[in-house]
Amino acid sequence: TMASTTAARNAIKRCFPPKQITTNSRYFSSSRASAVPASSILFDHDSRKQTWATALLTAIAVTSSVAFTAETTTALAEEDHANDDNNEEEEESTKILNWSGTHSVELAPGKYHEPETMDELIQLVSKSYHEGTHIRPVGSALSPNGLSFDSRGMVCLSNLDKIIEINKENMTVTVEAGARVSHVLDALRPHGLTLPNLASIAEQQIGGFVSVGAHGTGAAIPPCDEFVEALKIVTPSEHGVVKMTEESHGPMFKLARLGLGGLGILSEVTLKVIPAHRLVEQTIVLTRSEAKEQLPTLLKRHKHVRYMWIPYEDAVVVVSNDPENDLPLMGPGTEVDDGNGGKKKIVTVEDLEPKYSKDEKLAPLREFLRKLLKSKGTPIDEETISGMGFGDLRDFILASGNMLDPDHIKRCNKVEHEFWAKAQGIEIAPSDQKLQFDCGGQQWVYEVCFPVGTYGIPNSNSMDFVEELLKEIESSGIAAPSPIEQRWSSASTSPLSPASVGPREYETYESQNALFSWVGVIMYLPSEDFDPTGFRREFITQSFKEEYCKLVRKVGEKYGLMCHWAKLEVSEDPSDPSGGVAESVRNRFGPEVVGAFNAARDLYDPRRLLSCSLLDQIFGPPSPEK
């Protein structure tokens, strides 16, 4: 099994620049991690994405032979003896970098674990409990804030990725928590099934996907934790392995499914599934006033809607998605008779015909890059430029100038607006393809969620917040690149969800139909080839935290916002830009929810062996007697 683990790690390592793998440490990261060197940007995005996917599939194939093992005991002495016999690699430290390149952690030898079987995981957690050693769970290292990182000890379930059961009668899928979302989608596809919604990418492990409250977009669709029907956690407590459903554990189940890795190591999850379907995606560009006026209609008309605001430009890119067989009459497509005396919409070949070719769409970006390179006296390689896709061109353009210069950012946003104006049109593809999209290169991300009325009667907060934010950005000259992304979801009943309506004695129309908006701001980071000293990244990080994030919080004070758990930065230092954030989070959820979560931790992790700095700062460290 050690050979299979090593082969899997090496397959993943091949995704990354060799210079990032240090001699005396094992380097692990997710499929989207590590700085992208200029040489990697020479490839079109699609081909680069295929390279990542191929390596990851290789890793999955190598490790997928690990079967689910019954919950039996294995002598810890045998485990220790096996560890002594491992090669020198086991004595090396482990360095983990998250996908956005914003956080890393280095663990001493023996502090990072990748159990090969479920029984190994159970024994590892039991040993941790009895010895008092830390064991923070980590998934694909995708959280921009490094939520899963803790140098005291970590465990990754990448080898525990089995698809246990696909139940078409109950419309559920049961998987080991280390399975990636993309792996689950692949397994569901032959059965004509898919997941109800996705976040922007599909390389998360299922455990992390639900534990941090990942979300997609759709005014009538809740965040992904609501899809969990049953779960199993391995706890560092006298309770050991705990199986939960809402029927068996009530409120505790809802705390555990979005438990931030703090109540137990999520080892098995049963999720709702829906019939596979194709989505018709329409991309249009509206002015800001048009986007504001049309939002209430668009939220009800389309199953999925997201806005991409372009700072310093009067432009909002609107992307909507609807099932091919249930297109809104006022939406995309061609109107025809439905055979019952009515009308319906279909998508014809003519509807799918793009107005502009790929070269015509990318022309504004390519031309701007040529001007930048010429102004710097850099030789222009036309073959390289013509091989770049949209995401690569944007990354290269941004990094080729001063990324904190508002004038440079304005020019970048202007040519991006020109690209989207020509990219308007209709596409059709399976939902698991359309609900994913290119997030761009390495970046700082800050995403907040706040209530915006109900599905039936949305209030003006969605637009008021973004309008105020843009006004402050543009008046203060913040170097805000495109896009400011805005999505919507219905409420979650998980108490710790940013989209939770909070504790209630009884349900009301407002709580059952609550609508939430999610708004994310970004600052891209240059790769090592554009920033060999790391100074540029440091300045961008400082600007993002001290100016951009503080501005978002300032504007959002009156809207009751809560940051996405995977993008929340906290600090114990009052002078730090993130100082005071932990207190605001406690206030947002209130003493009842905070107390309930800590009571659950006392039950399932009394020694706080699963915790991390962020959880300790928000919810408090263990009491001395524990």
Image (cartoon, rainbow, N blue to C red):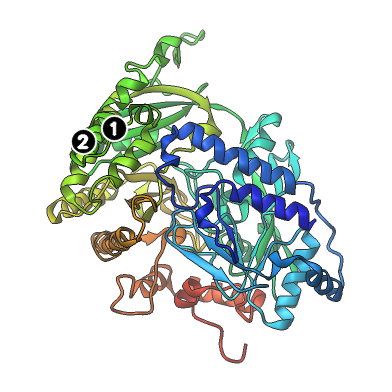
Residue 417, relative to residue 400: is it above or below? Answer: above
556 or 57: nearer the eye? 57
Q: Is residue 486 above or below residue 29?
A: above
The x and y percentages for residue 287 are: 21, 33
Question: What x and y, as percent, mark residue 87?
Answer: 75, 65
Looking at marks 2 and 1 on the same chain, the residue that comes earlier in the sequence is marked by: 2
Instruction: Determine contact: label 2, label 1, CB under 8 Å.
Output: yes
Query: Which one is nearer the viewer's eye here, 435 or 546?
Result: 546
Would you say 568 lies left or right of 83 here?
A: left
Q: Which residue is mark 2?
A: 374
How far apart are labels 2 and 1 at the CA level? Answer: 7 Å
**Residue at the extreme bottom:** 625
Within 10 Å of disc 2 (Cα), the crowding (few <14, some 14-19, many 20+) is few
Task: State the SS at label 1.
Answer: loop
Which residue is found at the position 56% from the left and 83% from the top? 622
Please tell me whether mark 2 sits on a helix, a strand or a loop: helix
- The answer to whether 587 is drawn above or below residue 266 in the figure is below
Image mark for residue 214 = none
Q: Give the mark count.
A: 2
Q: Please, what is the three-letter code of the amino acid marked with disc 1?
A: Ile
Q: Which residue does the numbered mark 1 point to in the structure image?
A: 380
Q: Is residue 612 visible?
A: yes
Relative to 169, 250 lies left or right? left
Q: Nearer the viewer, residue 279 or 226?
A: 279
Please give left or right for residue 330 compared with residue 259 in the image.
left
